[in-house]
Image (cartoon, rainbow, N blue to C red):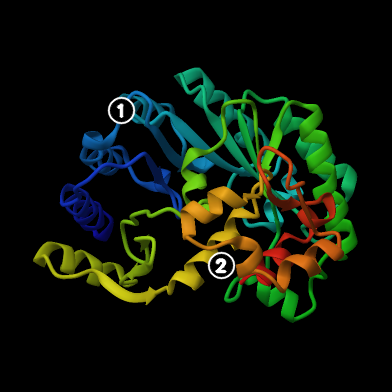
Amino acid sequence: MLSFAYCDALALQIDSLEGEFRTIYIGGGTPTVLDLGQLRKILFSLRKFSGISFEFTIEANPESLTAEKLSLFLDEGVNRISIGVQSFDNSKLKKLGRLHDDSGAVEAVAKAEKSGFRNIGIDLIFGVWDESIPSWKKDLKIAAGLPVTHISCYGLTYEPHTSIKECLKDGSITPLPEERSADMYDLAISYLADKGFAQYEISNFSKPGFQCRHNHTYWNNDPYTGLGPSAVSYSGSVRIENIRDVPEYVEKVRSGESLFGSSEKLSPEERAKETAAVKIRTMEGIDFDWFRKKTLFELPDLEREALPKLIADGLIEQSSPCSAAEGVRLTRKGVLFCDTVSGAFL
């Protein structure tokens, strides 16, 4: 079967890696659909990189998460699990095409805790057509009451070439008004804060000490290595995407050929602007001194047109030059319009 050949190829690619890594994240799909043997092969090949203070995350869906797989994860050094719950409302789950129900979602978290995981994250989606604010608040209430340390809240997006997008096109569903989606997001920020989950990035909330370290790699625009078809690697100036076709990927790994499908080289200014665009998503914002050391650019000079306008529009605020760390960060209004801010920096 192709899945076995794919796992073999992925293990071979991992074996060829050299260097040190601070985090590992297995995701980009649903890794738990693989059987125990397939998962064991991949995890065993990653042993050489794990360590005591290492963050090692795996994504899981409730319907394919078993006690045996959870035990395997812990035995092989995985210390953080992110479960794609999406909702605890059966009607909403059905609309999203999910295979689990509300009890399955709660049970998955309970199984993860019982197995020994102490760093458990879940994903939630809001803004589904016809969704009400009371329904969303119920999702938040159930989520905050579970033994989880991290909650990600994502607004529904209508991706091209999906059944939901087609329903939108033919008029069988009508997206929520932007105002209601904004109110739902605002509710998540305030409600989760009251329950001890601090917002540290646009979509991410955590208990103290449980921020996702892997995600900071992207928000700091640091280098990373991607494994598998379509995976992206970034050196700090060059972004490379692996070939997309799975059979071709398997064959090229076996024959030792290059896996590169496409690449993009960034100029120093493009890299600096991209760094600003992703770093502003964090609640700490952009420290001018950090940005200078990171990119060799002065942010006020680099964004001389964008910064004054964003400040005037109330989307970002600048700390005083006399403060310990001078920089800029999103305002509460800016949090709601983060894509506008990031776009302006680019």
Q: Residue at x 64, y 48 (%)?
A: 282
- Indicate whether 316 appears above or below 53: below
- Please report the residue visible at 51 percent of the width from the left and 18 percent of the height from the top: 114
Q: Secondary structure at mark 2?
A: helix
Quarter holding the N terminus is bottom left
Q: Is 65 or 324 nearer to us in this picture?
A: 324
Left or right: 117, with 205 as reference point: left
Above or below, 35 relative to 328: above
Disc 1 is placed on an element classified as loop
Q: Is residue 279 above or below residue 342?
A: above
Tag 1: amino acid: Gly
Earlier in the chain: of badge 1 and badge 2, it is: 1
Residue, x 36% and y 68% (percent of image)?
238
Residue 51 is marked as 1
Give the Cα separation between the discs numbered 1 and 2: 34 Å
For disc 2, the marked residue is 273
User: Horizontal and vertical percent for residue 184?
Assistant: 84, 49
In front of the other: 222 or 21: 222
Q: Quadrant of the C terminus?
A: bottom right
Number of the front mark, 1 or 2: 2
Q: Quadrant of residue 307?
A: bottom right
